[in-house]
Amino acid sequence: MPDERRITMVTGGPILVEGPVEITLDDGQVVRSDRFVVALCACRRSKTYPFCDTSHRPKHRRGET
Amino acid sequence: MGHLPRPRGPISEGIISALSGGALPSAGVTDPFGEDLQLSLYVCYELHYQGFSGVDSGWEWDPDLLRLRLDLERVFLGALRDGVPGGDDVEAAIDELMTDAPGGVSHFLEDKGELWHLREYVAHRSIYHQKEADPHAWVIPRLTGQAKASVVAVEFDEYGGGQGSAMHSALFCDLMRGLDLDDSYLAWLDDVPAPMLAVVNLMSMFGLHRSLRGALVGHFAAAEITSSPSAARMTRALDRLGVEETVFFTEHVEADAVHEQVMRRDVIGDLLRREPELTADVVFGLQATDLVEGRFAAHLLGAWDAGRTSLREAADAR
């Protein structure tokens, strides 16, 4: 029995999954990544969805408007 | 391997002539961010990477040259330490890098860059990306446990996951050829001014000194944290300019979003659990990277805003 696959939820950031992974999107499209860790977008802002592109980050430095 | 560059002052002239058979100079007093010191360090460090054609590889461990290099490193390292706020708050130092303030080079290229700006930027960066990931490989034997395993995993990605043609250095050469730039090793060294030399010298210095392993890890994290959003803008800049060879940047958008998380959690996190006394060095590495990148960006944008080339030679990026 192999070890359980490790998934890490990053607060305010992506979901980290040990790769390789195959992901089925809502429309049936299947995407793959063989990276050792895959960062999945959880904020839905990524332009490379379902993969994280760091769009979850705040746009301004703290204290700026 | 590259060819020896042309000297830019008395120290680099002495070193370059010594590598061709002359006597070594002494360091003397010099501008830590100036052309002479930065080219001198770049030449000394290159002996540990690919070397130079026609230069005996024994120079890598020549004690007199190493002594001179150490004198130059003390000047450079001292200026870096003086130029950053320091402290021991890693999270705050990371937060400083997380926000995507406009006004950077990739913003310029995305919004209004012309093809000659893009070609100059790529020519500058080539003196790092042709050896992408190499300076960071030196930290591996200085780490243990999860931090070591995770740096190796990130480096495996940087080196194309075992495929030579997918190494990031190879993807960068593809980009250079797509822009009709000479992609032979260090072809642009003579044209690249001190601000970009300093970006690479920082990594080489941190990588070669075990005593600076915390700074190397901080630097590596800073590079991964800032790379993804900037690579996304570069992809849009290339699209707008009709450049088809975009893989180098699209790969970095996705890869570095992962590497950022791995560097923060599994490398910095694990390293500082094992060696908490390295905290200030990690902060220094994060901040010093921001300092040299900021100086490089200011140089580029200053030249471009004045309508001038940012390279040392005539603007016709070959």
Image: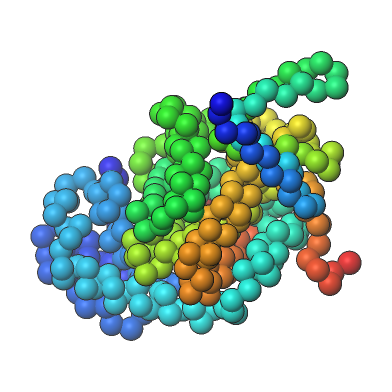
- Quadrant in which the C terminus of chain B appears: top left
Q: In the image as oriented, which residue stretches furthest toward the front?
A: A1
Residue B10, image x, y percentages:
27, 73
Residue B261, image x, y percentages:
63, 49
Identity of the residue drawn at 63% across and 34% down: A5
Residue B14, image x, y percentages:
21, 68
Residue B203, image x, y percentages:
43, 59
Task: Specify whether A14 is left or right of B17.
Answer: right
Task: Specify whether B197 is left or right of B268.
Answer: left
Quadrant of res B38: bottom left
Describe the colour scheme in one phrase: rainbow
Q: Is residue B106 above or below residue A17?
A: below
Quadrant of res B36: bottom left
Q: Is residue B78 above or below residue B52?
A: below
What count of labels does the image hold? 0
Identity of the residue drawn at 59% across and 79% down: B87
Q: Is residue B262 above or below residue B269?
A: above
Q: Is residue B194 visible?
A: no
Q: Is residue B273 visible?
A: yes
Which of B81/B138 is in front? Answer: B138
- Quadrant in which the N terminus of chain B appears: top left
Which of B270/B221 is in front? Answer: B270
Identity of the residue drawn at 85% across and 18% down: A27
Identity of the residue drawn at 32% across and 74% down: B72
Q: In the image as oriented, which residue stretches furthest toward the top?
A: A28
Task: Specify whether B45 is left or right of B163.
Answer: left
